[in-house]
Image: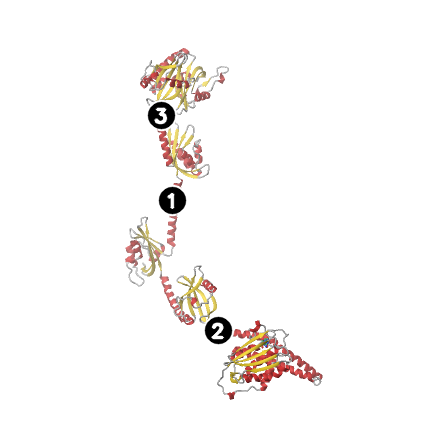
């Protein structure tokens, strides 16, 4: 190549080569002589700058400029024309310019070669042409490319029939074995027409044409350049063969390598890019486009575009690395974030790239590979965060261990040494044992069991954890502190393992339990007290736990403890474990629910409940207690049956009193006002001295006063009797009497009175004598009351019958009337106090509603019974049944009821009948 350039330097043509931008890269001596610019000054400067195109006359100002020459070359490949130029010193130069484009293997325009032939001096030119031809010939003889001059031989019709070699260089001879003068037709691989066809297709008008030819017989590729030497009479062509087989093979291999590399990189999710400094364009592999969030095939039109994708936080770092690499021409490695332009997604990329300076052009080329490390970065960040968290946790843990109220000790399993003691541990030991060996530590502490015996080393929690990897909880022992005092402690220990399961550390936690022990014995004491109290108290006390169904609804309570008073009061033997429903089968669900609420901390409840099965009433106080950490119910109770009965009786009494006052007040007022007004009348007669004149009226007035006094008496008797009955003081004075006589006498006594009321009276008896034990005065009161009612509720002309029947063990006394009768719905109630069927004032008699209740009480006291049958409008029958029995009482002692007494009694009993 050196000889070639020397050769070119000394030709008579000014030879100039440029790059694609027409920047001068070659400048021979002739060029220097022609244009006046020395080579040094010319190289690196553009043609435009150095060789000015001259304007030589009208019209020549439209001559093409260098830019247009370049365009023509890029498009056409060559040109040949005459033009005028200015030399460095302004001299006008007329020259024939021939130019040819230089292209790379991809046919890309890479530069141009120019030859300027000074036409002002043709002679000189001829000489120089000759010299040049010689030069070329020498050159062609030397080069490795085969060169030949061929003539296409045609017949008279112009049809080609052979090709003759007119000239050939040694390389051609070597390649083909042919020499000047040889005919080619028989030598050709393909028929002659094939080559003629190629020739015809070539565009040879604008200089040499180029095509690639594959020799099948030699399996080689040739770049063939053809140009026309003459085509006037004969067709004479110059042909240059360049064996490019290796080049093609290399290209093919390169292509394969590229493909494989791309496939491998794709498989590794790697992407590559290539930056061309000339076009300032970055070619991206599809994977690279994908990584950058661009479309497949998309390129980055300038290096700046790539930087724009880099995350703002990483831009400075990225740029500094890249610029440094560019400066030093080295490689770079960088991890940075990008923001994908389409979706704004952030991805981490790792990039390795190299910069290479082309020694010839001085250009810096860059290419690199990159891959997505987002996941790895995420993991790294997570790991970092985890590490930070870990560190934080460790610090926190240390801080916690320092403030924790328990002593903490860590023992290194390998060295059997105390490797950490927290503040509390040091405080409890009385000194810092850190770094002491375990054996010393145990010895110094003189560990003992609470009963004072030595603690065997192999039983110690720390030993169990270190040797057997066991977790030991809550072992009590005493330690001897450095100051000589002994304290009880509770210690637990646990082993810590490494990832292979080997014990690395034993952790011991211990607490001073002096206070706990003190409270424990105090508790024990109070529990003992509680137990003696529990069993000695008179009140029943039991502890129960709720029993639930599947829906968590309390359905019973199980006794878990009970004192002896409980057993005494309930009669239950060994009640623990028994269900409360067995004691109170009637206990209601709502009561169980309420007690469950109390058991779980609800407000204590107090109530009085009846244990029907026991026939007793209890006053209960229920409250919540904890047993074995569970909610339970404590019930304290005592027997209130007596108080309950007394209270009920008192309540009844009070009720009676209330009723008596309510009902009787009216009854009291009526006779009182009658008496009062009658007395006023008598008073008037007396004042006027008209007593005699009004004798009859005075007599009637006195009778009225008397009757109302009887009414008073009846009422007061009844009230007194009622309260006697209620308080149990109403007693019978029993004697053996002929009941028939008693009844007969009383009916006879009032027969006249009844007839006087316009009513008939009938007495009938089945037996003449029936001796029974009875209180005759009270029986008379019963019969008088029944007859008095019969009169009160009879219609005029009615009949009242009194009948005695003997039923053997019973005597029946029936009092029947034909009066107004009683509605069926009132029949059951009339024997109750203050029950009156008709409370209006339209009745023909007065009454307090007490009479029948006293009748019933008297009959009951005789162990008899009373009943009623009645039909409204038809009358009523009251039957009194008295048992036939006698009492051991001598007949003589019997007190006869004085007849006056009976009259009074009749008057009293009948006092509330009108029109007496
Ligand atoms: P009273 O003093 O009001 O008569 P009693 O206790 O004797 O009170 O009677 C209660 C009620 O029973 C009477 O008020 C009356 O309504 C009804 N009664 C009692 N005896 C008879 C009867 N023979 N005929 C109809 N009703 C009667």
Disc 1 vs disc 2: which is toward the camera?
2
| Secondary structure of the residue carrying numbered label 1 | helix
Tag shown at residue 248? 3
In depth, the one of 442 and 19 nearer the eye is 19
Q: Residue furthest bottom?
A: 892
Residues tagged 3 and 1 counted as in contact (Cβ below 8 A): no
What residue is pinned by disc 2? 643
Q: Residue at x 43, y 12 (%)?
A: 120
Gap between marks 1 and 2, in whole Å?
A: 80 Å
- Label 2 packing within 10 angstroms: few (<14), some (14-19), many (20+): few
Image quarter hosting the N terminus: top left
> Is there any visible trace of residue 854 in the rendered image?
no
| Residue 589 sits above or below residue 351 on the image | below
Q: Position of residue 522 (x, y in %)?
A: 38, 65
Name the residue beneath numbered marker 1.
Answer: 383
Residue 878: which quarter of the image? bottom right
Q: The C terminus appears in which quarter of the rendering?
A: bottom right
* Image spot of residue 115 (x, y percent): 41, 17
Residue 16 x/y as whole percent:
40, 19
Q: State the count of labels.
A: 3
Q: Disc 3 versus disc 1: distance between alpha carbons? A: 52 Å
Q: Residues within 10 Å of mark 3 (few under 14, many from 20)?
A: some
Say which quarter of the image contains residue 209: top left
Left or right position of 697 against 861: right
């Amino acid at each position: 190549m050196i000889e070639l350039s020397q050769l070119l330097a000394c030709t008579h043509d000014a030879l100039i080569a440029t790059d694609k931008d027409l920047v001068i890269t070659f400048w021979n001596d002739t060029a220097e002589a022609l244009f006046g610019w020395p080579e040094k000054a010319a190289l690196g400067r553009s043609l435009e700058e150095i060789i000015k195109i001259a304007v030589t006359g009208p019209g020549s100002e439209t001559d093409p400029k260098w830019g247009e020459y370049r365009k023509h070359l890029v498009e056409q490949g060559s040109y040949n024309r005459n033009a005028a130029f200015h030399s460095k010193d302004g001299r006008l130069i007329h020259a024939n310019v021939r130019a040819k484009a230089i292209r790379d293997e991809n046919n890309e325009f890479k530069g141009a070669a120019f030859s300027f032939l000074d036409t002002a001096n043709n002679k000189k030119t001829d000489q120089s042409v000759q010299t040049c031809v010689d030069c070329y010939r020498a050159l062609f003889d030397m080069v490795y490319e085969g060169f030949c001059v061929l003539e296409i031989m045609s017949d008279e019709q112009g049809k080609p029939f052979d090709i003759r070699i007119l000239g050939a260089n040694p390389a051609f001879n070597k390649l083909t074995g042919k020499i000047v003068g040889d005919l080619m037709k028989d030598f050709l691989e393909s028929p002659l027409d094939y080559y003629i066809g190629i020739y015809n297709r070539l565009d040879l008008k604008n200089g040499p044409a180029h095509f690639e030819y594959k020799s099948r017989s030699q399996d080689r590729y040739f770049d063939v350049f053809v140009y026309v030497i003459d085509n006037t009479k004969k067709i004479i062509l110059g042909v240059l063969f360049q064996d490019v087989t290796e080049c093609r093979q290399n290209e093919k291999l390169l292509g394969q390598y590229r493909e494989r590399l791309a496939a491998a990189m794709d498989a590794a999710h790697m992407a590559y890019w290539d930056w061309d400094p000339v076009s300032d364009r970055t070619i991206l592999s599809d994977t690279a486009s994908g990584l950058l969030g661009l479309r497949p095939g998309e390129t980055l039109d300038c290096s700046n575009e790539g930087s724009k994708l880099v995350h703002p936080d990483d831009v400075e770092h990225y740029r500094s690395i890249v610029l440094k690499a560019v400066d030093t021409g080295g490689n770079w490695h960088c991890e940075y974030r990008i923001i994908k332009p389409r979706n704004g997604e952030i991805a981490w990329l790792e990039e390795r790239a190299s910069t290479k300076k082309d020694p010839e052009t001085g250009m810096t080329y860059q290419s690199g590979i990159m891959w997505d490390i987002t996941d790895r970065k995420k993991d790294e960040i997570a790991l970092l965060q985890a590490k930070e968290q870990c560190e934080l946790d460790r610090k926190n843990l240390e801080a916690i261990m320092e403030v924790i109220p328990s002593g903490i000790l860590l023992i290194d399993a390998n060295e059997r040494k105390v490797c950490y003691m927290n503040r509390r541990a040091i405080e409890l030991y009385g000194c810092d044992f850190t770094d002491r060996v375990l054996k010393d530590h145990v010895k110094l502490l003189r560990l003992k069991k609470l009963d004072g015996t030595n603690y065997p080393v192999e039983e110690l929690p720390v030993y169990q954890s270190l040797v057997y990897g066991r977790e030991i909880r809550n072992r009590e022992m005493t330690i001897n502190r450095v100051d000589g005092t002994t304290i009880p402690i509770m210690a637990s220990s646990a082993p810590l393992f490494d990832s292979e399961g080997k014990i690395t550390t034993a952790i011991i936690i211990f607490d001073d339990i002096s206070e706990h022990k003190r409270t424990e014995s105090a508790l024990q004491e109070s529990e003992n007290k509680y137990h003696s109290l529990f069993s000695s108290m008179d009140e029943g006390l039991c502890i129960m736990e709720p029993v639930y169904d599947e829906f968590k609804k309390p359905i019973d309570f199980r006794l878990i403890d009970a004192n002896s008073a409980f057993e005494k009061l309930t009669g239950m033997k060994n009640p623990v474990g028994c269900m409360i429903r067995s004691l109170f089968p009637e206990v209601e669900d709502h009561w169980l629910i309420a007690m469950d609420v109390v058991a779980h901390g609800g407000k204590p409840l107090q109530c009085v409940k009846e244990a029907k099965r026991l026939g007793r009433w209890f006053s209960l106080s229920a409250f919540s207690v904890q047993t074995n950490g569970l909610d339970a119910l404590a019930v304290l109770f005592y027997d209130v049956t007596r108080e309950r009965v007394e209270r009920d009786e008192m309540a009844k009494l009070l009720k009676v009193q209330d009723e008596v006052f309510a009902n009787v007040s009216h009854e009291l007022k009526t006779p009182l006002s009658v008496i009062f007004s009658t007395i006023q009348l008598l008073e008037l007669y007396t004042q006027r001295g008209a007593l005699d004149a009004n004798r009859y009226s005075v007599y009637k007035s006195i009778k009225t006063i008397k009757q109302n006094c009887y009414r008073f008496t009846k009422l007061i008797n009844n009230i007194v009797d009622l309260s006697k009955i209620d308080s149990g003081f109403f007693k019978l004075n029993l004697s053996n009497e002929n009941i028939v006589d008693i009844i007969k006498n009383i009916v006879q006594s009032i027969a006249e009175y009844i007839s006087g009321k316009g009513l008939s009276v009938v007495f009938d008896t089945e037996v003449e004598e029936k001796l029974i034990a009875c209180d005759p005065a009270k029986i008379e009161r019963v019969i008088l009351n029944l007859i008095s009612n019969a009169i009160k509720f009879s219609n005029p002309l009615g009949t009242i019958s009194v009948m005695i029947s003997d039923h053997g063990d019973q005597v029946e006394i029936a009092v029947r009337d034909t009066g107004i009768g009683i509605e069926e719905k009132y029949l059951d109630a009339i024997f109750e106090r203050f029950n009156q069927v008709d409370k209006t004032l339209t009745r023909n008699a007065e009454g307090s509603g007490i009479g029948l209740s006293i009748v019933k009480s008297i009959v009951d006291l005789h162990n008899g019974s009373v009943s009623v049958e009645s039909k409204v409008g038809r009358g009523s029958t009251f039957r009194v049944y008295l048992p036939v029995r006698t009492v051991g009482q001598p007949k003589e002692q019997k007190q006869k009821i004085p007849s006056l007494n009976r009259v009074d009694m009749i008057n009293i009993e009948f006092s509330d009948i009108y029109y007496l």
